[in-house]
Amino acid sequence: MIVLGIESSCDETAAAVVHDGHRILSSVVASQVAVHHPYGGVVPELASRKHIEAIVPVVNDAIAKADITADRIDGVAVTQGPGLVGSLLVGFSFAKGFAYGRGIPWVGVDHLEGHINSVFLEPDPPPFPFVALLASGGHTNIYHVTSHRAFHLLGQTRDDAAGEAYDKVAKMLRLGYPGGAVIDGLAARGDPGKVMFTRPFLDKTEFDFSFSGIKSAVSRYIQTHPATDRNDQAHIAAGFQAAVVEVLSYKIIHAARQKGCRHLAVVGGVAANRGLREAVTREAAEKGFTVHIPSLDLCGDNAAMVAAVGYHRLKAGERAGMDDDVYSRMKFKPIRK
Ligand code: KG4
Ligand code: ZN
């Protein structure tokens, strides 16, 4: 089955063509970073307008790169939420129209479900059950994943998401937006032992996170020790990254152990973080776990992960209706265990 995936929940307009939920025929991502950069964050109204401009060319590009014609597409999967409503509506309305016009089925997909399923686009996906850490600009959640469609929330951030903390610290250090990748690069050149920041594990046996404390600690440190050159910035970035990575890797490995899962996954924009990838891979190997982290292209927002989820839904006979609407906030508050 060939599924066209569409994603427009935030500041990326993306389309992808995926075969049987795992083989990517094409994946196109049009980033709006340059549009939002001068404002230091995503401006929702500008995001919607850019999605409108980009959606048709991006979809056409994805179909052309997949080397197919539109009549080969069996179904459409589109991100329904969570995200910016104005942005979501662009992809969602396009998908409705495209599917209706071509007389093919379509389904709405949860963005977080998409990130979790991104590991199935890699050659060696995890067997069920596994635990997954989803760390992005909007969420930091740990799940126990028992099927393509069933995941149970074990813990989540009580304040900022990990990616949000990265972006805020980057702003404090005047490194521009978005800051995750810049801090990651700088951290590699700094000494993580030079400036130590608190590690908010909360309760070590629980899986909830808190990142606003680390962010405030960095802010206080910068007020008393202004970063005057690239070296100072690098040490602060390294200290901040060490604290975030230690908490994230501790909790996901602890979750795998507690759930008796040998396999764990790290997904979402922050899964692109070099420090996090290294730390989780090393610690998991030491403790006998197998780690699945998607390639960099599949960590950030993309439409291939949306098509991957859509495949399973369409195959199960699910169909969206013309009255369906987008949603802005995390929808499924799955069973806490
Ligand atoms: O998944 P994603 O592309 O969008 C959301 O669903 O939010 O995640 C974006 C987040 C941003 O906060 C960005 O700063 C962060 O992922 N990010 C990183 C890195 N690359 C992107 N954070 C840390 N290290 C990175 N290398
Ligand atoms: Zn995302």
Image (cartoon, rainbow, N blue to C red):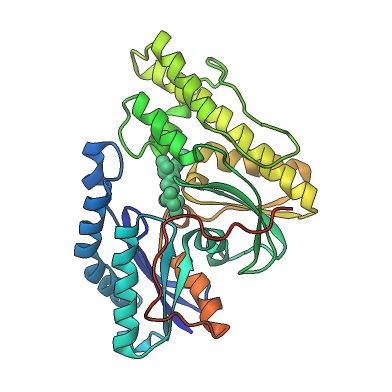
Q: Quadrant of residue 201?
A: top right
Is residue 157 positioned above or below 62 on the image? above
Q: In which quarter of the image is ligand 1?
A: top left
Residue 302's x, y, as percent?
41, 60
Residue 93 left/right relative to 324? left
Relative horizontal placement of residue 16, taking residue 97 as reference (left or right): right
x, y (%) of residue 246?
Answer: 62, 32
Classify 95 as above or below 83: below
Query: Which of the two residues, 213 or 114, is positioned nearer the viewer here?
Result: 213
Give percent across and percent down for residue 28.
33, 64
Residue at screen point 52% across, 37% down: 159
Residue that lies at the very extreme toward the top in this rendered image: 224
Q: In the figure, 40 relative to 121: above or below?
A: above
Count of all numbered marks drawn on residues in the image: 0
Q: In which quarter of the image is residue 157?
A: top right
> Looking at the image, can residue 29 be seen?
no
Judging depth in this view, the residue of 62 and 204 nearest the camera is: 204
Question: Residue 264: x, y in percent?
Answer: 67, 53
Q: Which of 309 and 120 is in front in this view?
A: 309
Q: Is residue 82 left or right of 124 when viewed as pictured?
A: left
Residue at 35 percent across and 91 percent down: it is 103
At a point 23% along the width and 52% down the height, the residue shown is 45
Whether residue 278 appears in this view of the structure is yes
Residue sitting at x 36%, y 24% = 172
